[in-house]
Image (cartoon, rainbow, N blue to C red):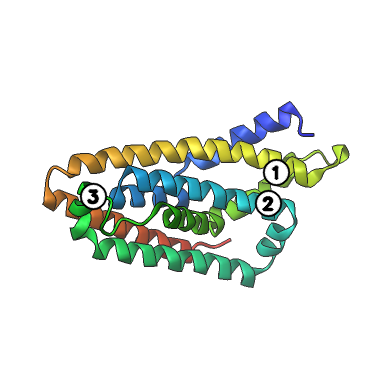
């Protein structure tokens, strides 16, 4: 199995990488600003599942194929970018309806399952996560100990736990800011629009990211 030294070293490196805001963090913040805490937390869960799907793909050899093929990597990257832009446009269009979302569970707030699936798709097509796991994760595996895929899965749980804590903190912080903006319809509409613009910008940035 994975040694304690490898676990700690990988945890330290994961913390450094995850602490730098990337697509997952910005996506969570954008959803928090547009829809509030519940949506933000559901997004965090989806991101977590999507990120761990990358870990599984790397441990099973699929991640290496994606990273080694420019065509496949570009396709994955553009799919995630297009979806982010779609979500951003939808959030911007509905920015004037956020007051109803705060008052009732009805309205334009996406359902929890839909939100989790949105987060999963974004997490699974995150270029930063794909490159990190494909390039770094294998370096902390003890090939002599055997069970290499299992070792990668265990190490992936460490990164997932760190990501869960960091993304939750970002989501709760952004949700608190949104609550303050709720004191004014104009401010609330502005923050909803800002969340949509942030998602659109994130999608465009992801589309131009090079491996």
Quadrant for residue 169, please give it: top left
Q: Which residue shows up at 28% across the image and 59% down it? A: 108
Q: Residue 179, can we see it?
A: yes
The foreground one among 32 and 58 is: 32
47 versus 165 height, above or below: below
The one of 191 and 70 positioned closer to us in this rendering: 191
- Residue on which disc 3 sits: 104
* Label 3 vs label 2, nearer the camera: 3
* 32 lies above or below 5: below
Specify which label sits upstream in the sequence, 2 or 1.
2
> Mark 3 vs mark 1: which is more N-terminal?
3
Q: What residue do we see at 29% from left, 52% from top?
A: 34
Label placed on residue 153: 1
First-in-chain label (3 vs 2):
2
Crowd tier of the residue under label 2, counting other residues whose Cα lies within 10 Å: few below 14, some 14–19, many 20 or above: some
The answer to whether marks 3 and 1 mark residues whose Cβ atoms lie closer than 8 Å is no
Looking at the picture, does residue 45 appear above or below residue 95?
A: above
Residue tagged by mark 2? 56
Asked if residue 43 lies left or right of residue 2, the reply is left
Residue at the image position 12 percent from the left and 52 percent from the top: 186
Q: How crowded is mark 3: few (under 14 residues within 10 Å), some or many (20 or more)?
A: few
Between the residue at mark 3 and the residue at mark 1, the CA separation in whole angstroms equals: 40 Å
């Amino acid at each position: 199995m994975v040694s304690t030294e490898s676990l700690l070293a990988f945890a330290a490196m994961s913390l450094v990488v995850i602490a730098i805001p990337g697509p997952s963090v910005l996506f969570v913040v954008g959803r928090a600003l547009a829809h509030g805490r519940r949506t933000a937390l559901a997004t965090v869960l989806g991101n977590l599942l999507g990120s761990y799907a990358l870990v599984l793909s790397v441990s099973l050899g699929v991640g290496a194929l994606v990273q080694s093929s420019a065509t496949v990597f570009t396709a994955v990257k553009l799919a995630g970018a297009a979806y982010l832009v779609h979500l951003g446009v939808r959030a911007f269009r509905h920015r004037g309806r956020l007051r109803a979302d705060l008052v009732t569970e009805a309205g334009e707030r996406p359902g929890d399952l839909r939100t989790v699936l949105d987060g999963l798709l974004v997490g699974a097509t995150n270029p930063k996560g794909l490159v990190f796991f494909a390039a770094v994760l294998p370096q902390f595996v003890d090939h002599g100990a055997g069970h290499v895929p299992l070792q990668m899965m265990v190490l992936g749980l460490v990164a997932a736990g760190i990501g869960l804590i960091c993304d939750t903190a970002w989501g709760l912080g952004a949700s608190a800011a949104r609550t303050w903006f709720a004191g004014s319809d104009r401010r609330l509409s502005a923050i909803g629009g800002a969340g949509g613009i942030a998602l659109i910008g994130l999608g465009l940035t992801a589309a131009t990211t090079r491996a």
